[in-house]
Amino acid sequence: QVQLVESGGGLVQPGGSLRLSCVVSGRTISHYLMAWYRQPPGQKREMVAGTKYADSVKGRFTISRDNAKNTVYLQMNSLKPEDTAVYYCNNQWETFPWGQGTQVTVSS
């Protein structure tokens, strides 16, 4: 059974950085195109980083992976209040069961 466990979120001031991790079990991520998504309060979930980046995060966010650890990362720099959201990982076709996500709050 596939399980996604996201971590690394928290409260950060504008301009700060965070690195999110997503450990995948039950599937080998080297077989998949992986992506990061986010769901701001009251809004729909959107993809922010995969083979492409959302315009709102280009130049600030970087997706990477460690296939040996079956883990996907999202390095987030120059964070803005509008980056506040619950962040999730999944494959680009969103076929894995969603994890619980990790909350990122950008506020002074």
Image (spheres, rainbow, N blue to C red):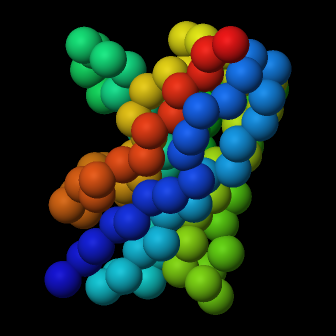
Tell me the residue at 69%/58% (across/down): 64
Image spot of residue 94 (x, y percent): 28, 50
Tell me the residue at 40%/35% (across/down): 86
- In this view of the protein, can residue 96 be seen by the observer? yes
Tell me the residue at 25%/13% (across/down): 42
In the rendered image, the vertical position of residue 4 relative to residue 102, given as above or below: below
Residue 46 lies in quadrant: top left
- In this view of the protein, can residue 55 be seen by the observer? no
Point out the image quarter for the C terminus: top right
Left-right relation of 98 to 58: left
Residue 13 lies in quadrant: top right
91 or 15, nearer to the observer: 15
Image spot of residue 23 (x, y percent): 48, 72
Image spot of residue 107 (x, y percent): 62, 16
> In the current view of this chain or complex, which residue is farthest to the front?
108
69 or 79, nearer to the observer: 79
Tell me the residue at 44%/38% (across/down): 103
Left-right relation of 48 to 102: right
Image spot of residue 48 (x, y percent): 52, 31
Point out the image quarter for the N terminus: bottom left
Q: How many marks?
A: 0
Left-right relation of 98 to 33: left
Residue 76 lies in quadrant: top right
71 or 102, nearer to the observer: 102
